[in-house]
């Protein structure tokens, strides 16, 4: 199944398949499944149309989704216990019931191309101000203190520089002249 342009395999669990989105970790996927009321053992193929609609609406604009209302308990459904008063400090509320999107981690997630653009802008900022991190990015080296003697292969692949081959010889130079400068000196002297 494709959801917002990202392929989610039908046989996988929903909380695992959601990690195919760039910017959703396992913990965020678990919280997201709880927010839209999908069982943790549900597979992608077992989702109903309403759950798919809720999921796509949530992922397309998470900040526009209203805060979740508190779930009623069994006792409050029968009217035997009064509702507890709302706390004065919104930070004391569970994250799903906080009024501002910035206070709820799920309502402030950034995904896919927006997140990639943000990461590239941060790297460009570090490079422009000349910080240590920016210099490491520019040189294609590990950025966060990893060793460079043996295990920098991943950093070399991810922080690859776009280098062009510049020639210092004249356009009329032959391959023999370029490869053998001593032979060239003997030939012309």
Image (cartoon, helix red, strand yellow):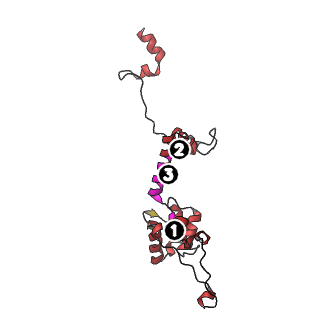
Q: CA distance from mark 2 to mark 3?
A: 17 Å
Which of the marked residues, 2 or 1, is nearer the chain's N terminus? 1
Q: Residue at x 45, y 77 (%)?
A: 49
- Image x and y of residue 96, in percent: 56, 72
Q: Which mark is residue 119?
A: 3
The kind of secondary structure element at disc 1 is loop
Q: CA distance from mark 3 to mark 1?
A: 24 Å
Instruction: Mark 2 vs mark 3: give the one in front.
Output: 3
Which of the marked residues, 3 or 1, is nearer the chain's N terminus? 1
Q: Confirm or deny contact between disc 2 and disc 1 (CB under 8 A).
A: no
Residue 27: which quarter of the image? bottom right
Instruction: Mark 3 vs mark 1: give the one in front.
Output: 1
Q: Is residue 179 above or below residue 186?
A: below
Please name the residue that numbered disc 2 is placed on. Answer: 157
Q: Residue at x 48, y 75 (%)?
A: 51
The kind of secondary structure element at disc 3 is helix
Please name the residue that numbered disc 1 is placed on. Answer: 100
- Magenta range is 108-123
Label 3 crowd bin: few (<14), some (14–19), many (20+), radius 10 Å? few
The kind of secondary structure element at disc 2 is helix
Any part of residue 80 in sight: yes
In reply to whether residue 109 is colored magenta, the answer given is yes
- Image x and y of residue 14, in percent: 54, 69
Q: Nearer the viewer, residue 48 or 137?
A: 137
Please state if 114 lies on the left or on the right of 132 as rendered. left
Q: CA distance from mark 2 to mark 1?
A: 40 Å
């Amino acid at each position: 199944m494709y959801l917002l342009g990202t392929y989610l395999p039908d046989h996988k669990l929903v909380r695992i398949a959601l990690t195919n989105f760039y910017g959703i970790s396992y913990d965020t996927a678990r919280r997201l499944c709880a927010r839209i009321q999908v069982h943790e053992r549900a597979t992608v193929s077992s989702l109903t149309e309403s759950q798919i609609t809720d999921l796509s609406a949530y992922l397309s604009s998470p900040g526009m989704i209203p805060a979740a209302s508190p779930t009623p308990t069994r006792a409050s459904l029968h009217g035997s216990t009064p509702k507890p008063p709302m706390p004065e400090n919104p930070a004391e509320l569970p994250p799903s019931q906080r009024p501002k999107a910035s206070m709820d981690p799920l309502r402030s997630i950034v995904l896919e191309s927006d997140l990639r653009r943000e990461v590239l802008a941060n790297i460009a900022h570090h490079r422009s101000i000349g910080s240590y991190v920016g210099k490491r990015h520019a040189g294609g080296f590990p950025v966060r203190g990893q060793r460079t003697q043996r295990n920098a292969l991943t950093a070399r692949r991810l922080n690859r520089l776009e280098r062009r081959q510049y020639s210092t010889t004249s356009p009329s130079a032959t391959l023999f002249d370029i490869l053998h400068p001593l032979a060239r000196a003997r030939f012309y002297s």
